[in-house]
Amino acid sequence: MSDVPPAAAPASAPSRRDPFRLLAAALCGLQALVLLGFCAFYLWELAQGAGDDPTRVVMSIVLIAVFAVLLGVLGRGWLQGANWPNTPTIVWNVLLLPVAWSLFQAGRGVLALALAVVGVLGVVAAARADTRDRAA
């Protein structure tokens, strides 16, 4: 008979209740939903005939959908206690900062500020999340 209780969590799994892990997962999920919203908007524009080049619109939808799915996978990885979403989450959110700066220069200050806040929060959440290997 084993001395380990059946409900014990694996020793190498990070804490799923870590607030930074939950924040990183929530931000990845939010970003995925926003990108899916852009896909829906482009589909609506395509159906209305507003796009000047249907091929470009369809390819934009496909590319945005790929990133939305990948962000959803990152969010799920965070929720499942995996360590691998750390670096891709940081890279993605750092890449949002130049986009925010471009929006600011284009006169879209509120949108730029929102995107910059999400980007910085994403970097901080991923960097502070508990990703220690507890097997040692």
Image (spheres, rainbow, N blue to C red):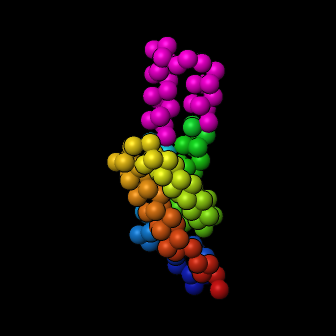
Q: Which residues are magenta?
A: 35-63
Q: Nearer the viewer, residue 16 or 35?
A: 35
Let me know if residue 103 is in the magenta part.
Answer: no
Which quadrant holds residue 60?
top right
In the rendered view, would you say 62 is above or below 29? Answer: above
Query: Residue visible at 60% across and 18% down?
Result: 53
In the rendered view, would you say 76 is above or below 103? Answer: below
- Across and down, in percent, residue 77 comes to 56, 58
In the rendered view, would you say 94 is above or below 40? Answer: below
How many numbered discs? Answer: 0
- Across and down, in percent, residue 120 comes to 46, 62
- Across and down, in percent, residue 92 comes to 57, 55
Query: Residue visible at 50% across and 32% down?
Result: 39
Q: Is residue 81 left or right of residue 105?
A: right
Q: Is residue 114 visible to us here?
A: yes
Query: Residue visible at 57% across and 62% down?
Result: 90
Q: Quadrant of the N terminus?
A: bottom right
